[in-house]
């Protein structure tokens, strides 16, 4: 099963312009598969021979490489970064090094100093629903252009299979729920735990893994560090370190609150989201789509899904995108505020098949600064509720048409 990644055309343009390109993302999101479509001159530092060679003599290792080259999992051998800097400074021609890594290298000051201004960086996340269906386009751009208004009415479709499975490519090759559950369990022990022990100073791995399970129940909620510290038995300093580590390896995203000066007092605490709904369901103990639909967690799983789709498409957009959530001190809440080319859209996510005026209550309070206010719901029609306020079916905005849905079953 092959997936057309939305990053590919952007990546192909970037390697024509820059000497080095770095693709960062969690384990098993498809980085290696993506870069091997571009070049067959591929070296991975998961290979013990390549690892030892580069570790022991990074200068010789880099100098003997045939250029252009793909270097996979480069975070394992930070010794090569100064050598890469020298090579690029000597010859700034495009398309020399295509790098991948499972951690955000630029959070390391020594790496940042070595490579700043010498490479361009892309984040790769688990598959979006567009990629599962092999469709082109960008969700962010479609929202701001108003393309969702032109969607025709149709019967409801089931996107919950995708939400339950999540976006790891390997998961979509597995037909059996039990085997998917086992794969996700192995992901925690084989990849996540390994990366944490390799790149982080985790003194108590059991507490760290317990934190991950507890964070699953926080996805889509305000991050209350004091409560989380009490629940996990992890002190505040260590908790901050663990949360930063989980961001470093692309397992969670911390979402900042909206704070524009519009006469409101906004909270300062962030929200937290897991970066994959399949992994989220596993951590919540949900083992089937039907179980997910009956779960008390369905609302937060759906909100996490919408956030992840917005996040993925924001990374592949033509222009910078900023995503926030909205919450005032008097508890007025809006799930997402999206900023694109100095315009704003407010988005609410509702796990319901009908929408009323009440669902737009908080959006209406700020509609004067919005291009659109949107409530995603499980219905079948785009419905206007006021000027530039619309109820929008999830299936409509994700372009999920009936003749393309076999892969979601």
Image (spheres, rainbow, N blue to C red):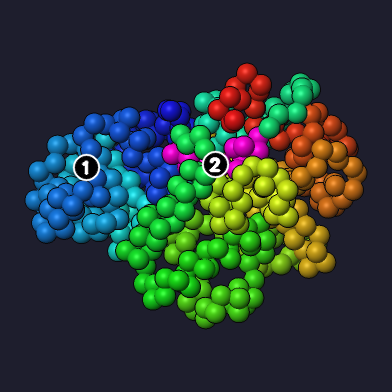
Instruction: Please tell me whether residue 169 is drawn above or below residue 308 in the rendered image.
Output: above
Answer left or right for 139 relative to 212: right
Q: Is residue 97 visible?
A: no
Closer to the camera in the image, 90 or 165: 165
Residue beneath disc 2: 177
Query: Which is nearer the eye, 17 or 238?
Result: 238
Let me know if residue 162 is in the magenta part.
yes
| Residue furthest out toward the right | 357
Residue closer to the observer: 259 or 147: 147
Taking the spot 68% from the left edge, 42% from the top edge, the residue there is 290
Q: Which of 268 and 236 lies nearest the eye of the viewer?
A: 236
Q: Position of residue 144 (x, y in %)?
A: 68, 35
Instruction: Determine which residue is flagged by label 1.
Output: 43
Magenta residues, dominant SS class:
helix
Q: Which residues are magenta?
A: 159-172
Q: Is disc 1 placed on a helix, strand or loop?
A: strand
Residue at the far top: name it: 403
Query: Is 307 rendered above or below residue 188?
Result: above
Q: Residue at x 44, y 64 (%)?
A: 245
Q: Position of residue 63 (x, y in %)?
A: 11, 46
State the residue at coordinates (81%, 49%): 363
Q: Is residue 23 left or right of residue 233?
A: left
Answer with mark 1 or mark 2, whichever residue precedes in sequence. Answer: 1
| Residue 22 image position (x, y, % from top left) | 34, 45
Location of residue 331 (image quadrant): bottom right
- Observer able to see residue 371: yes
- Residue 207 relative to residue 384: left or right: left
Rendered residue at 16%/49% (across/down): 50
Distance between the alpha carbons at the discs numbered 1 and 2? 34 Å
Q: Is residue 175 magenta?
A: no
- Which mark is on residue 390? none
Q: Quadrant of the C terminus?
A: top right
């Amino acid at each position: 099963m092959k997936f057309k990644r939305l990053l590919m055309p952007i990546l192909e343009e970037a390697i024509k312009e820059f000497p080095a390109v770095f693709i960062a993302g969690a384990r098993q999101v498809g980085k290696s598969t993506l870069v091997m479509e571009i070049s067959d001159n591929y070296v991975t530092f998961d290979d013990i021979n390549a690892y030892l060679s580069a570790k022991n003599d990074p200068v010789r290792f880099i100098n003997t490489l045939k250029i252009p080259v793909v270097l996979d999992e480069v975070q394992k051998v930070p010794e090569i970064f100064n050598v890469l800097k020298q090579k690029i400074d000597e010859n700034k021609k495009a398309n020399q090094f295509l790098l991948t890594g499972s951690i955000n290298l630029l959070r390391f000051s020594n790496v940042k100093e070595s490579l700043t201004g010498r490479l361009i960086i892309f984040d790769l996340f688990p598959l979006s629903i567009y990629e599962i269906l092999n469709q082109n386009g960008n969700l962010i751009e479609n929202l701001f252009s108003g393309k969702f208004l032109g969607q025709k009415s149709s019967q409801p479709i089931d996107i919950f299979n995708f939400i339950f499975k999540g976006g790891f490519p390997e998961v979509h090759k597995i037909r059996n729920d039990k085997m998917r559950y086992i794969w996700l369990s192995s992901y925690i022990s084989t990849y996540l735990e390994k990366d944490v022990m390799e790149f982080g100073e985790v003194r108590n791995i059991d507490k760290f893994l317990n934190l991950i399970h507890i964070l699953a129940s926080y996805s889509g909620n305000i991050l209350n560090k004091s409560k989380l510290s009490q629940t996990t038995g992890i002190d505040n300093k260590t908790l901050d370190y663990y949360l930063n580590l989980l961001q470093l390896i692309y397992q969670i995203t911390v979402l900042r609150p909206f704070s524009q000066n519009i006469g409101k007092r906004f909270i300062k605490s962030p929200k937290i989201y897991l970066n994959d709904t399949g992994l989220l369901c596993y951590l919540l103990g949900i083992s089937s789509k039907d179980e997910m639909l009956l779960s008390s967690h369905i609302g937060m799983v759906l909100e996490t899904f919408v956030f992840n789709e917005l996040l993925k498409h924001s990374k592949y957009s033509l222009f910078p995108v900023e995503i926030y959530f909205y919450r005032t001190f008097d508890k007025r809440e809006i799930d997402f505020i999206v900023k694109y080319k100095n315009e704003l859209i407010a988005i609410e996510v509702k796990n319901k098949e009908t929408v009323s005026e009440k669902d737009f209550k908080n959006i209406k309070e700020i509609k004067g600064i919005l291009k659109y206010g949107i409530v995603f719901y499980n219905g079948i029609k785009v419905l206007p509720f006021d000027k530039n306020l619309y109820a929008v079916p999830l299936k409509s905005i994700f372009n999920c048409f009936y003749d393309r849905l076999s892969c979601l079953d």
